[in-house]
Structure formats: C-alpha cells, structure tokens
Image (spheres, helix red, strand yellow):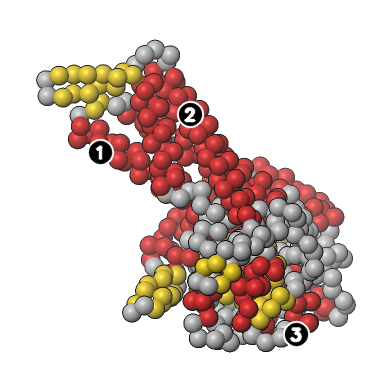
Amino acid sequence: MTNERLATPGADPSPTDRPAVDTSKRDGAARPTPARRDDWRRRYARRLALTDLLVLVWVVYGTQIAWFGWGNAAVTMREDSRISEFSYWLFSAMLIALWMWALTLFDTRDHRVIGTGPTEYARLARASFALFGAIAIIAFLSRIDVARGFLLLSLPAGILVLVFVRWLWRQWLLAKRSAAQYSARVLLVGSEQSVAQTARELLRAPGAGYVVVGVCVPSEPNPSVAQEIGVPAVGTVDAVEAAIVASGADTVIVTSTDDLPPDKVKQISWGLEAGRQHLVLAPSITDIAGPRIHTRPVAGLPLIHVETPRFTRGQRLAKRLMDLAVATVGLIVISPLLAVLALCVKFSSPGPILFRQGRVGYRGETFTMLKFRTMVSHAEQLLPELGRQSRDTGNDVLFKMRNDPRVTRVGRVMRKYSLDELPQLINVIGGSMSLVGPRPSLPAEVDQYADHVHRRFLAKPGITGLWQVSGRSSLSWEDSVRLDLAYVENWSLLTDLSILARTARAAAFPGDSAH
C-alpha cells in the first residue's frame, strides 16, 4: 500500500464522479441527486457473482465427473413403494443455483464486508455449510438417495476455491484502493480533534476503502487542521447537506457528537438517500475487536455493549495445543536448516552459537530467550556507547540501529529473513513463549512502562505478533504498545493464523531489515 494522501485538496472530481443536482422537491426543499459513485459497488458485486458462478460450475460438475464419470448417473427418490430417478446433471445444476442463492442470501458480496477482514470468507463458509446441511436434512426426510461422497467432495472444494478466488479479487481491489479508487468518498463530521484522529486512522488503512474528501466541524475550521489531514474543510456541522454536494461524498462519518446540536445526527440520516448514501458513527473506542462489540436497542437508544476481555482456560488450552503442534512439527522439519545456520554462526565470528537473553514474559515472569547469535560476542559492552549516538530507527524505549556495527555479516543475512529467531521454537515448546504474542520485553524496558502497558503480560510473548507485522522498527512506541494491547485484548485463533501467514510473507519478502 502506498502512503499517499487521502485526497488532494481542491481537486475536481472526474466527470463520472461529479454529483448531479435534482431540482425536484421533497418536503419543500431541493434535494441533491446522489452521484452514481456507488456504481463501483454494484459492478464489483456483479463481477464476484460471475466468478462465483464459474467456480461453482467448475467445482460441482468437476466433482460429479470425478465421482461418477461421464455416464448418466441418477439420484434415486423413494416415494412409498414407487421409485423415481432423475439425472445428476440436473441435480448438479440445481445445486449450483441453490449455492448461488445461498451466497446472495448471506450477503457475501456486500460492500461492507469486501476488501478487508475475515467476515467475507466466514460468510462464504457459513452459506455453504448451511446449504449442504439443509440438503442433507431434506434428503433424509424425503428419502432422496444422494451420493454422500459427491456432496462431501463438493463442499470443501467449493469453499476453498471460492475463498481463493475472492482472495484474488481482494488483491485487485486493494491495488485499486491504494490509488483511491473503488472506495467510499467520506465526509467527516465532528470536532476538529476527532476529525483529525479519524482521518489519520483511515489514512493508515487505505485498503479499508474510505477516502476522505472533506470535513465539517462545529465552527469555522482552523486552517492547520485541514492542512494536517490533507483534505478541505467544506463547511460547518450546520450545513452538512450542502457539504455533501460540494464534496461529492457518498458516506458521512460522524466522529463525535459532543459538539453537535441536539438531534443533528438524526437530521443527517434523514437527509441521506437510502441505498446510495451512508451514515457511519465512529465511537471513541479504538482497537476493540468486532466480536466484543454488540449493539442493543434499549428504550429507543442504540446502546453499544463492549465486553471485557476474557482469557478462559479453553482459549489458553487451544492456543497451547496449536503452539505445541506447530512448533514441534516445525522444529523437526527445519532441523537440517538449523544445523546449517549453527555452523555458519560458529565459523563467522568467535563466540557461542546461541544468544541467551533474559526477557519478561507471561505474568511478568523472567525467562531466557534463545536466538542465533548475530552480533559480536561483546555486543552488550558496546551498547552504552551506541546509545549516545543518533539512531535511524527504533523509538524512545526500544533501541534500534538500521546499520548496527555490532552485527556480523552472517548475522545481517539471518536478521533480514528472521532466521535468527528460529531457536525460539524451543521456547515455545518449553512454554515460556507462544508462536504469536506481544514482543518479549527486556527488563530495562519494563522499568519504563506505564501502568497500562503491563497488560501485555496477560499473554505469553510471541515469536511474531501484530507489532512485528505492522511496521516493526518504524513504529513509534505508542503504536507498538497499542498493537500489542490490541492483540492481548482481542485474541483469537483466527487472528493467530492471520498473523502467522503475514509473518511468512514478510520473511519471504523482507522490506525492513531492522530488527
């Protein structure tokens, strides 16, 4: 993703993006006809539907041919004493049609779930399992004899290929969104501080599909705010409707309500056209995972319930079992590589093969972390002198140097591909570390932690984690803490698998050699 600006101030929209104005009246006032910027949503959904259909035709008929051959096999239906049959070619066509209907029914192509997050994939799986479960029940109750092997092959094959094709579409969509295309055009409404914070967060995640095209604040905006976030201030909160037309926005995000007049949010929602313009409320809670947030209407109030983090025995057992299984198998598979790396370290410079260092882990307990030695043996003695020099990476708490003179030539290569961290699989098997978790802290760093940072010790430190796959040494200390705490409070097995996949990709295509 490129870190380009969300929008260029003053830039004219393209002819296809320019909003038209309808002179018709509704409720005595002229209402803007929303621009057809949401056409990209329908176009993208149609493309997904077409590829879904092609995938299902290929998978279902391919499975049928693989199971039955090219013959005219038949599904048997038993009705009392009579037996009737119909061809599997017809049954497969019906299955494809029902599968397409299920994908539509579960909103798998909805613009709210495409592009980022696991929801799109989860809906694909739920729709498929629901359909095949219904088929199994109906077949049992109706005494229809359908080949179980045919269904058992079609279901996982269909889900896997559908997810893979959707992933390919997602890569295409992310490329478009990095160029500010195929994205919602957003008008931010709220206080100057909340508008600036939300704009910065959206800038950090262009793949989410939100391009800020203007802001509305309670009073005449401070020019420095618009300059900071790189978008024009197109009005105040008293003229949101006019600002939508002026900016060509199709989505309004209310970033704070404290400075808005009473019922202003309701008035904004009334002024939007259903299906074409959208209203989003951004509560002032960040880094909270979706499963912990529940909206519950009470007495007309849309109350947002945020569950406190839970660390159950079942969750810890599941994580521990995954750690043991992956680390044990991984250690066996890569043992020849470990032997080669050990020899390289041994003959590259005098000193031990493994570097042992005390780190602070789960519940604040100290443990010995293992790594391949990548520095000269007297590296710790050189640290005070290097600490007085200017650093080109790292942050206020974590010491990093992009071209650390203590690193050996072999160590530089090992760090680039994260090979020096492979011995930490032994820590994982021993139970002092996990595959995924917060960064293992040095005791000297812990002495500088604020009280809330100690929540990172509620989970075992990891070989990799959100901090490591989201910028590593280029992150500020505040961002590093935020990511670690977000992981600890929102942990799930799916999150761990996602981070491991991102880590493997980052190791194969390293973009930051600083460790």
Dot placed on the residue nearer the N-terminal end, 2 or 1: 2
Task: Tell me if residue 155 can be seen.
Answer: yes
Q: Where is mark 3, residue-wise?
A: 222
User: Looking at this view, is 54 or 344 the one in front?
Assistant: 54
Residue 57 circle label: 2
- Tell me the mark number nearer the camera, choosing from 1 and 3: 3
Residue found 49% across the figure and 54% down from its top: 119
Does residue 509 appear left or right of residue 81 in this picture?
right
Task: Tell me if residue 439 can be seen.
Answer: no
- Tell me the mark number nearer the camera, choosing from 2 and 1: 2
Q: Amino acid at mark 3?
A: Asn
Q: Residue furthest left?
A: 81
Dot placed on the residue nearer the N-terminal end, 1 or 3: 1
Instruction: Sort mark 3 into few (<14), some (14-19) or many (20+) by Cα contacts within 10 Å.
Output: few
Q: Where is mark 1, residue-wise?
A: 137
Does residue 340 appear left or right of residue 167 in this picture?
right
Residue found 75% across the figure and 59% down from its top: 13
Residue found 42% across the figure and 32% down from its top: 96
Gap in angstroms between the C-alphas marked 2 and 1: 23 Å
Residue 87 circle label: none
Question: Can you give x and y, in whole percent of width and height, for residue 175 in the image?
Answer: 70, 50
Instruction: Sort mark 2 into few (<14), some (14-19) or many (20+) by Cα contacts within 10 Å.
Output: some
Question: Can you give x and y, in whole percent of width and height, for residue 92 in the image?
Answer: 39, 26
Q: Amino acid at mark 1?
A: Ile
Question: Can you give x and y, in whole percent of width and height, for residue 59 in the image?
Answer: 48, 29
Dot placed on the residue nearer the N-terminal end, 2 or 3: 2
Does residue 480 appear left or right of residue 392 in this picture?
left
Residue 69 vertical position relative to residue 162 in the rendered view, above or below: above
Gap in angstroms between the C-alphas marked 2 and 3: 57 Å
